[in-house]
Structure formats: C-alpha cells, structure tokens
Image (cartoon, grey):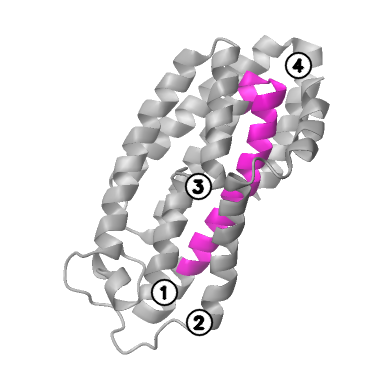
C-alpha cells in the first residue's frame, strides 16, 4: 500500500511540477520528508512492540523517499524507485518473521522475547539480517538507494536537508540497534510460549530468498538500472 501511495505521489509531482513549478513540490516534499523522519525517530525511541517498531520504521522510509523525490533528478528518482522495491522486500520479510515470532513465542513484545538468536537460530538469523537490510547497510539494496538519493539531494542544493535526514537516521539506527540487541541477544526473562515448536525450515525458505534478493539488488550494480532510469525520466521530464 505504501508503494502504491508513493507512486501516486510521484505522478502528482510530475503534474504539479508543470502546473506550479518544481520549487512548490520540492518545498512540500522536503517539509513532509523531514517531518516524517522526526516523528519516526521520536516514536522508535520508546517503542517496545515488534510489529509497531516495523510499522514506525516505514514512516522513516517514506520520509527518505519524499526527500529523494524532492531532489527530482533522474538519479534521485531512480534511487527512489529502487528504494521502494528494496524496502518492500525487506519489510515483507520482517513482518512475516514477526508473525512467526508471535506464533512460536506467543507475543511480539520485545522485552518478552529475549535471546532469539540463541534459542531459535533460524528465525533470529532471518530477523537479524532483515534488520541489517532495513537499516540500509551494505550489501543490501537500501544502502545503494539511500546513497544515491543523498547524492541527488546534494546535487540540487538540498545538502542541508540530507544532513538533517542523516541525523534523524542516526537516532533511528541507535533505537533499532538497541531494540534488536534485546530481541536477538538478551534481555529480561522470557514469558512467551516456551513449549512452542521450532521454526519450520520451509517457513525460512521464502524469507531467506527475500534477503538474498535484497542483497543481489545491492551487489549487482543496479541490475534494473536501465528500467529504473527509463521510469525516472517519465517523472523528471
């Protein structure tokens, strides 16, 4: 749904740039993007529920997309489209993994699901790598898309907005790392379903495949580059 909504926003931008001038949409998107990042950072600092944490992180990524769209260059819009794809895959993996956490643990409260990596290695590993992808670290595609969105912002004089977004991302990174440390490595005594069965390997296959796809997009020098640039030119022209 978020991807569809942002597609509509990009179409609106293409029309508004012609009717009202690019500066109008640029200002609107910068305000919306920075506001989204600020709200996401404040909410993630105190979040203790796994699914809500993932939901609020989507607010962060919508803010990053808004800033990339505000830049409006072909590079930035292509990066926005890649980011939509990579974020959709990574977030799908994490939401499915959180559903499995609820099944095997009986709760999604982070403080009640400690040391997941030691107790359920497959599920914990998937969640750990999924968070690495979501945080925009290499080798995953979100690293490439975020880097190129920032390059596009700097190229059009929005370096100050890129700097503010990096500060917000640093806060969000610290919050998610703190929560994931408690979830994966340790924390208070678990109160979840201790007798639930281990995560079936068949459940892990599509989730691992999603992570591999994210890594492939990040490592393969934009395998969709020509397609992304062609789509970006529809918005930029």
Residue 137 tag number: none
Identify the mark nearer the N-term, 2 or 4.
4
Residue 122 tag number: 1
**Labels 1, 4: front one:** 1
Tag 2 and tag 4, C-beta contact below 8 Å: no
**Labels 1, 3: front one:** 3
Identify the mark nearer the N-term, 1 or 4.
4
Q: Residues within 10 Å of mark 2 (few under 14, many from 20)?
A: few
- State the image quarter where residue 69 is shown: top right
Residue position for label 4:
17
From the viewer's perspective, is residue 158 above or below residue 53? above
Identify the mark nearer the N-term, 3 or 2.
3
Residue 139 tag number: 3
From the viewer's perspective, is residue 141 above or below residue 195? above
Tag 1 and tag 2, C-beta contact below 8 Å: yes
Residue 201 tag number: 2
SS label for mark 4: helix
In the image, the segment drawn in magenta is 69-97
SS label for mark 2: helix
For the residues marked 2 and 4, what is the alpha-carbon distance in whole angstroms? 50 Å
Identify the mark nearer the N-term, 1 or 2.
1
At a point 64% along the width and 46% down the height, the residue shown is 220
SS label for mark 1: helix
Is 165 inside the magenta-drawn segment?
Answer: no
Nearest the eye: 143 or 169:
143
Residue at the front extreme of this rendering: 220
């Amino acid at each position: 749904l978020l991807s569809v909504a942002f597609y509509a926003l990009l179409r609106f931008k293409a029309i508004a740039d012609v009717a009202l001038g690019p500066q109008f949409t640029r200002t609107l998107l910068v305000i919306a993007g920075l506001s989204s990042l600020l709200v996401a950072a404040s909410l993630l600092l105190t979040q203790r529920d796994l699914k809500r944490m993932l939901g609020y992180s989507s607010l962060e990524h919508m803010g990053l997309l808004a800033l990339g769209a505000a830049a409006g260059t072909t590079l930035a819009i292509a990066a926005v489209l890649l980011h939509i794809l990579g974020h959709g895959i990574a977030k799908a993996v994490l939401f499915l993994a959180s559903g499995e956490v609820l099944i095997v643990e009986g709760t999604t409260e982070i403080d009640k699901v400690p040391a997941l990596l030691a107790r359920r290695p497959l599920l914990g590993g998937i969640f750990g790598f999924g968070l690495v992808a979501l945080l925009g670290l290499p080798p995953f595609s979100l690293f490439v898309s975020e880097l190129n969105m920032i390059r596009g912002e700097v190229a059009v004089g929005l370096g100050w907005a890129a700097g503010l977004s990096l500060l917000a991302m640093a806060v969000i990174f610290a919050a998610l790392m703190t929560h994931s440390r408690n979830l994966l490595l340790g924390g208070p005594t678990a109160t979840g379903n201790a007798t639930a069965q281990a995560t079936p390997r068949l459940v892990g296959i599509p989730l691992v495949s999603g992570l591999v796809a994210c890594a492939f997009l990040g490592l393969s020098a934009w395998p969709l580059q020509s397609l992304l640039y062609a789509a970006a030119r529809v918005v930029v022209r």
